[in-house]
Image (spheres, rainbow, N blue to C red):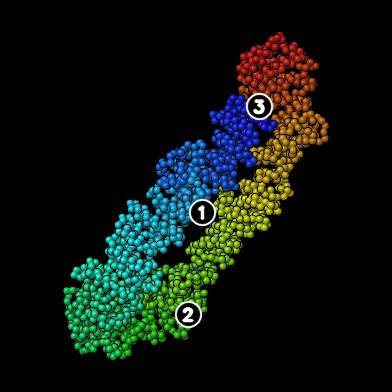
Amino acid sequence: MAAQDELNQLERVFLRLGHAETDEQLQHIISKFLPPVLLKLSSIQEGVRKKVMELLVHLNKRIKSRPKIQLPVETLLVQYQDPAAASFVTNFTIIYIKMGYPRLDVEEQCELAPTLLTAMEGKPQPQQDSLMHLLIPTLFSMKYPSEPSKVASPFILVEKPKTVHLLLDFMLDVLMMPYGFVLNEPQSRPNPASPQSSAGNGSAGGVGIPQPPPGMSFYGAKRIIGETPWTPEQLEQCKLGIVKFIKAEQVPEVEAVVHLVIASSDTRHSVATAADLELKSKQSIIDWNNPLIINKIYKVYLGDIPLKTKEGAALKPELKREPVSTRVKLKILPHLLRSRLAADTFPANIQVVYDGLFGANTNNKLRSLSLQFVHHICLVCPDNNKPLGLMLLNGLTKLINEYKEEPKLLCVAYSAVGKLSSRMPQLFSKDIALVQQFFEAMCKDDPEIRLSIQEALSMMVGAYTSLQGALLHLMEALIAAYMEKPEVQVRQVAMKFASTVFAPDHIPSRYLILLAAGDPREEVHGEAQRVLRAFPVKTTEKEGSKPMPSFPEMVSYIQEKASERMKTPAKYTVGTSILPFNPSAFGEIILYLRMCLAHSAGAMPTSQSLADMQDNSPAIASYVRNLLSGNPNSLLVPKGGDSNPVQLYIELLQQLLSAIGGVPVMYCLLEVVSVYPQKLAAKFADKIDWIKSLMNTNKEDMRELAAQLYAVVVSTMSGNELNTAVQNLVKITKDNHSPETQHGAILALGYMVGRYLAKKKVTADTQNQELPMITRSLPENEELIRSATNTIGSFLDSPSPLLTVAACTALGEISRNGALLIPNEGTGFTKLHLVESLLSRIPSGKENNKMKERAIQTLGFFPVGDGEFPHQKKLLQGLMDSVEAKQLELQFTVGEAITSAAIGTSSVASRDVWTCTEEEYTPPAEVKVNDVVPWVLNMILNKYIISQNPHVRQASCIWLLSLVKKLSQHKEIKSHLKEIQTAFISILSDPDELSQDVASKGLGMVYELGNEQDQQELVSTLVETLMTGKRAKHGVSEDTEVFQGGSLGKTPDGQSLSTYKELCALASDLNQPDLVYKFMNLANHHAMWNSRKGAAFGFNMIAAKAGEQLTPYLSQLVPRLYRYQFDPNLGIRQAMTSIWDALVTDKKSVDRYLKEILQDIISNLTNNMWRVRESSCLALNDLIRGRQLDDIIDQLPEIWETLFRVRDDIKESVRKAADLTLKSLSKVCVRMCEPSSAAAQRTVAVLLPCLLEKGIMSNVSEVRALSIQTLVKISKSAGARLKPHAPRLIPALLESLTVLEPQVLNYLSLRATEQEKTAMDGARLSAAKSSPMMETINMCLQHLDASVLGQLVPRLCDLLKGAVGLGTKGACASVIVSLTVQCPQDLTPYSGKLMSALVNGLNDRSSVVQKSFAFALGHVVRTAKDSSVEKLLTKLGTWYLEKEEPIYKSSCALTVHAIGHYSPDVLKNHAEQALPLAFLGMHEAPNEEQGENGDSTLWTEVWQDNVPGSFGGIRLYMQELIAITQKALQSQSWKMKAQGAAAMASIAKQQTGSLVAPHLGMVLSALLQGLAGRIWTGKEELLKAIGSVVSACSGDLKKSVPGQPNIIEVIDLVLKECHKENLRYKIAALKCAADVLQATQEDRFQELVGILIPLINKNSPTSAHTRKSKEDDDDDLDEKEKELQMESLLCAFESLGKAWPKSPATQGQYRLQLCQLMCERLKLSTWRVQVGVLQSMKAYFQGLLLLDKDHTDSVELSEILTKTCDAITFPLENKSYSSVRTEALNIVELLIKKIDECHQWGGLTPDSRNQLINSLTTMESDSRPELGEKATELRKRLQNLS
């Protein structure tokens, strides 16, 4: 039966479908029956299913031909989602969903879009694809919320990860889909878009599968095309919709990044731009190192690469994704370049690289990006990923080999190889072929590429530093080959390889570098020289390698190479000479060999200056002797066999000298011969002429060195040769033609005689057997020497400065080695003349410095060689008197000369400088002593040190230092230590820095020389002098130079002793005063000590020693020294920094002594000297930066507070220093408060009180600003750790809002108008709420709970009551609001207090604060007790009724409105209190000044939001409303009375029909009570209310009810009010009286007439004439007054009409009079009065008893009608106003009707009737047809009567 029923139902549906004629009918039937019909498909009956199928086939035909018919898609979707539905049903349902969804309007599609997504869950893949195919086009039209966080999104996908995955996959395919793609094209077609089209068909798998688009699988393309493919325009919209969907954050950003990247590469501009913009906006949010993003990008980029794994094999061909197109790859690669992870993802990274470099569809742009990616990989990848490195290297070399025509690409590729080599050197270390390839490329490629190869090779150098064995030799050969290439870059790189790959003692590589040093290009030879001359101090990576090759090996190698080169074209020809190397390379070889010689001899190799080189000569002498003694016959074997290295060296020197020359080469030759002349000089016996030729060169230094060599060689010859040589030289000196020759000869003479005398001196030493017997003293030689000396002396007065200097030098050399063989005194060339001559040259302005230096040296040498020199003291005196300004260097020379001259023959100056050091030298025993040190010392101490001339003092200090240094063991010095110290101390106070420095050095040396007792005395003297400031007084005479140029203002405090005082104080604090000497030795900051002369004093060594002695005192010294390094006094700073550098060598010392340093700094921050304060600030700034301060957290408050004080220092530089330190401290503290910091909680606890109490409340604006910034930052980083401190933090910050606000705003606010003030205050409060302080408060509020509120609320209350600033008040209110939202339950116990505080502030002068407090109250009541709310509302009610100030009224309105708005439940609970107040407030009169009434609007809102309609509300709260209005009426305020009246009137009007006892009595009594007393504005409302109440309830009022006034009382009271003089009020009273009388039918006409008739007469003109005459005067009358008069007239007539009684007696008394009055007024009045009179007349005739049958009086009636007819013709014929005609016509109609009813036609006289007929006839043609018709009808009735 059931089956039959189903079939019947289906038949009926079929029938209805057949009967459907229109589309609408068909649509209606489908909507109703399609879903249930589809459900029938699940029927078990075959017949039913067949029937359904028939029906559906029919349906399909009809639907398909009618595209506008809508299907019930929503119902079908619900049915589709039914989990119980059979699959057969769902399969058919989705067919109709697919058919119906695209037919829907766009809006409906958007509404159903989320349902489509929901419906996908758990459905088969093809159906899911179909649903997504429907959904995607809709996305373009979807509307998304602008702020997704606040408004629910249309798609809720959070809990549907599978759906999201499906959707994103589908979207990716849509974005990949090319426009206009057709899938069924033949497979063999070329597909340029596919990146692997050559392998495409094969890779697509099975036969017959068409090639999908790039980036897609066959299946993906097929499902996107679907049953109805999208047009290109539709596809563009779909893509835009997807971008829009992603932009609206409907799916996680991580998932959608790839989609945006793909979309940004779209061929349509609109899609690409939209995606690009979105990508850019999210760039900062996207984490490109997220594995999800990177793996997805790689998968899309590379497609599905078939792997030989189970998974790879399992991938069906139709599901295999193709790699994306080149266009997409170009978009993806820049994003991969942003990611470290992408570069580290192996093997995908290498696949991308190879695809980009060598893929089938790559292009130059892609190759370029791929190379950039290689660079990126090289920077990021781990250096142990060997496969990656190898593949990259192979790829790059392949690229380099294949792409020769792309220079830009090649450049980047070469650079990448370089980077790879520095990242993975192990890949390259054995691949020398690559180096060769690159070198070759450099030789052949373009210059632009050459630079890149050079860069790459430079980076690759490091990879080959560990080469060994054969590879090393191979590299050596390679470099040697390329070192000679013509391209400069090739040579440069080869040089770099040579210098880096090989150890510094590797001879062949050094040789190659030496060759490079002769390169013509500066970049090559400059670098080579730098490498060669830099002495490697640290041990190199090479195990066991030395800093330099050994001398013998290097020399023999060079010699070998030189011989080879002489046989090849590489040799170099200079004139007639042939050299193995070019001159510059040869010169560098010689210098390098000299460095090797020095190194092998154990000295420091240097080639910078000849003087420094000469210092090493004694060590070289020893080494050369050893070398030569090893092979005594070497000199006899110049060639063949093992030539001695020294011999080879000399040969090379000769070779270069002969051809080119060169001062350094000459020096090297001189040195090597001089160090061992006994053996080596003889070699040059036959080369004397060659040496003489060198003496004639045009270089002065060269001649000097050659002269020395000549002297050395000749001095080893026999006596005769010596004599001959001397005579020759004397002869040459006479030759005036060549000054150069003379110069050389003079010097040679001097050096020869000097050497002769030196040998003569040591002849007596029998132990020295090496000296030949020939040199023994011979008398004839003396004569020769004398003649030579005289010859030399004759040149002292030469006009040529060159010869003068030479003569001076020669004489010095002679006198250094022996006595001058000239007379002591007398005429001619004597010793006295010589001394005077030289002394005169020192101060001379004509002489150059060289001459002066030589003169001083020579003078110093005279007593050295001559023990009996007669003019020793004169000479010394002369030297000491020769001081000149600003000749510091010269004074050091003078000091040396004085020292030598003072000690005489015992001086070290007489040693052989080539073979003997100063330390080794001992004076000969038998020499005569000529020591005058006591005299010299006495002169310096007692004359020069105390001189008035500062230059003399400075010079004497230098001399004294020289004496103490050079003669430290001299008994005279040791016995005068105290005097010397005093002298040095006196110089310490000189303003000149060098003088001070020299003196301090001297003091240190003096101290070291003394014994223990001496040292104690010295210390006490020094300390006393320094600390008390006593010093030697320099008398001031007229030639005293008080200020040297530039010495003023050098020290900040004007105390030149400050540095030494500080040093002394430092030592004293350690209870070790003697340490002051150590400090002086360490304070080594003057540049002078770096000069050669300064360095000679060896203070570096002394400093090192002093440093060791001071180590035990480090713990006390470090804190002081640390601070002193930042002293503003440059002298102190430099001195202390040099002490610090010397003492504190361990970098961890500062950390070790951190607490001590900090304590010292803190205590000195407030020192009374500004210098100390400033240095303490700067030191603290340096100390805290970048340091972990967890150990000193407890000291932070002290530091902050002290710095706050210093920030307000009187000195600007101190303030700046404090500011800098505070900023650093702020950063450090913020970092310490971060959650990651271990001590964050402690730091917050320690810092906040300090910042709140001392910082924010400071008077210094900068301190306040910094404190607030710090607090804000701390609150951001500290988070929940702020909770315990919130009770202090929040109030302090709130107070700061006022403190930090500019005071000028308060001033402006006071001066502004109310409107301006409100706007300004609003802006101020807004600024306060958006300030950093408020931001901090809001952060704190997030972490509050009950534990904190107990302390916080009282403070907030205090602030609310006591705060003065607008910002603080407003922000307090805001905080309270936040608290009610944050922790409402916890706040309940404190709500009462808060409410009380807020209520007190409600009456603030500022309306903005008022609103804020009201707003806060509106929230707080939600958490408050009921009793508190009641109290609040009571108080507000009292204020509203009793306080007259507007501020109270507005605060009440604002508060109640806020409660209603934010806590509506609370208001409903207390409606009996609040709503009556609101009702009363609604009736507040608008403020005339403001022109609008904001308060009444607020009250109205409260009332309307909380009552069920106004009528119901009044009914509900009637008693309360009456109570409050009565209070208002009884108020002392007239305004409030008026408001009460208006409210009462409102109650009465609203309730008129339904007022019954007892409410009626209550209302009426209240109204009547209000009438008593004088008139006040608004009292009229009471009268209106009485009128309306009585009119509506007259029946009830007639009943006698207790407490309810009777009608008589009401009328009496109202009539009483009618007598009031105020016209406006009188009008209101009369209207009320008329209404009452009309409603009650009481007869009080007589009383009323007594009031009205005078009123009418007073306000009406008696005649037309009078009216006209008055019109001129009316100009003066006010328009309002005229209007009032008009109103009074109208009111009077209206009242007459309404109050016309039914009483016969009264009517009889007044009917004629009244008729007369009305008729008169009809004729004379304006149209408005006429209308009023006519209306009154109508009422009069309606109530006229004469027209009743019972009260007939034909005479009176006839009189009345006659008058009326006469008067009414006027209005009837009034052409201007239809309203007048209408009213008149109504009266005529009424009269006819009434006369007809009482059959008294006799009362209407014929004349009157005719008058009426005539007027009506006139009216028949009225412009208004209805009036004309009515007039016709009435005329006819009147005519019929006649």
Question: Mark 1 or mark 3, which is nearer to you?
Answer: 1
Which residue lies at the image location 69% right of the left edge and 27% below the top edge?
1691
Kind of residue indicated by mark 3 = Met
Kind of residue indicated by mark 1 = Pro
In x, y percent, where is residue 565? 24, 69
Kindly state the secondary structure of the residue where label 1 is placed.
Answer: helix
Q: Nearer the viewer, residue 1583 or 742?
A: 742
Dividing the picture into quadrants, the one containing residue 1462 is top right
Which residue lies at the image location 77% right of the left edge and 17% below the top edge?
1748
Mark 2 or mark 3: name the one nearer the start of the chain.
2
Point out which mark residue 1686 bears: 3
Classify 555 as above or below 288. below
Mark 1 or mark 3: name the one nearer the start of the chain.
1
Residue 1813 in sight in this render: yes
Kindly state the secondary structure of the residue where label 3 is placed.
Answer: helix
Q: Nearer the viewer, residue 1382 or 287?
A: 287
- Mark 3 Cα shell of 10 Å, populated few (<14), some (14-19), many (≥20): some
In this rendering, position of residue 803 left or right of residue 177: left
Point out which mark residue 1790 bears: none
Provide the residue designation for mark 1.
Answer: 291
Point out which mark residue 1074 bears: 2
Kind of residue indicated by mark 2 = Asp
